[in-house]
Amino acid sequence: MKFGKANLALIGAALLSLGACDKLELPGGDVTSSDSSASKKLDGYTEGHNTLLDSSFGFEKKTGEYIQDDVAHHSLEGYFHADPGWIGKGVAALKEARALPGGSAELDKAADALIASMGKVETHMASLDEYYTSKKYLDDKLARGKAEDPVMLAEIDAAGKDLVAFSKLLDTALDQRDVVLLEKLKDADPVKYQTKLALIHSKKLIEIFNGEKDPTKPELIAKGDAEIVIIEKAVADARAEATKAGRQEPNAASTLVQMIGEYRGFKQSRDPRDLDTVLTYYNQSVDLTNHAPDGR
C-alpha cells in the first residue's frame, strides 16, 4: 500500500525571536533582522500555507469531502459537503503577507496564483454550501449541483496544483533561512536550537516516505531510523537545556515523542496508514512551535 503524497506544514515564525539586534544574512546577500518585512512576509506566507493544510478544516480535508460525495452520481438522498472550512482564512493570511514589501518575486508570483485559485474555490464552495444547507437542491432535483460539479472539480484541481507549486518555493525559502538561523540559535538559545533541529529532521523523516509506493522497503526504514536517532537526541537535549535554564520544556517536545512512537509502531505493523499518524504529530509539533509565545 502506498503512503499518499502529502503537503507538509512548514516551520515558521516563532523560533526567529532572536532580538532586534540580531541580523540574518540570507543567501543572495539579503540581510534582514528577525522582525524585518522580508522575514515577516515569509512567516505570513507560512501561516496561510499551514492554515490551508489544517487536518480538520483545511483545503484538502474540505475539498476531499466534496469530491467523495460524487455529486455527478448522487441522488437526492443523503448528505452533501461543500463547507469551505478555513480556506478563506488561509487566503486572507496569504493576502496580508503578499502586501508586505521584500521577498522573492518568484514566490510572490506563486502566491498570487494560489490566492486567485483558492479564492475561486472558497467562493464557489460557500455558494454551494448555502444551496445544499438550505436544501434548494430538492426544488431543482439537484440540477444546479450537477451542472456546477465539473467546474467545482476543475477549480479544486487548479488550486491543488497551485498549492503544491507555492509550497515548494516557500519550503526552499524557509530552508535557506534555516541555514543561517540554526547558527544563530546554537549559541543564542540552545533550547530553540535543539527544537529547530528536531523539527527539521522530523520533516526529513516524513519526506523519506512521502509518496512512496512501498514505504516498507528496508533502505527507507534505515534512513528513517537514522533520522529518529537525531530527533530523539535533539528532543532530549532541548529538555535538558530547558531544565538547566529553569524554563519549561519546548511545546512540541511531547508531540515529537508521540511522533517517534508512531514511527516505531509503523515499523512493527508495516502498515503505511500508520505513517498518516506520524504526519499528524509532525504537523501538530510545527503548529505548537509556530504559535508558541516565545518560540519554544
Image: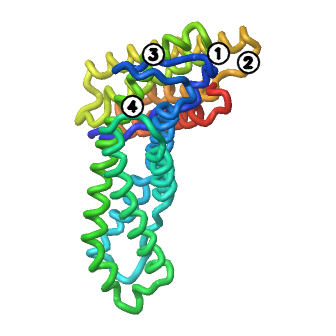
Circle 3 SS class:
helix
Mark 2 lies on residue: 247
Q: Which residue is mark 1?
A: 239
Q: What's the distance in space between the residues labelled 4 and 1, CA to CA?
A: 30 Å
Q: How far apart are the alpha carbons under marks 2 and 1?
A: 9 Å
Amino acid type of the residue tagged 1 in the rendering: Arg
Callout in the foreground (4, 2):
2
Q: Residue at x 27, y 39 (%)?
A: 2
Question: On the picture, is 159 further left or further right than 241?
Answer: left
Residue at 31 percent across and 73 percent down: it is: 71
Q: Quadrant location of residue 178?
A: top left
Task: Identify residue type, mark 4.
Answer: Ser
Mark-to-mark CA distance, 4 and 2: 37 Å
Residue 160: x and y, percent?
31, 52
**Residue under pointer 4:** 269
Say few, some or many: other residues with alpha carbon within 10 Å of mark 1 (under 14 / 14 to 19 / 20 or more).
Answer: many
- Helix, strand or loop at label 1? It is helix
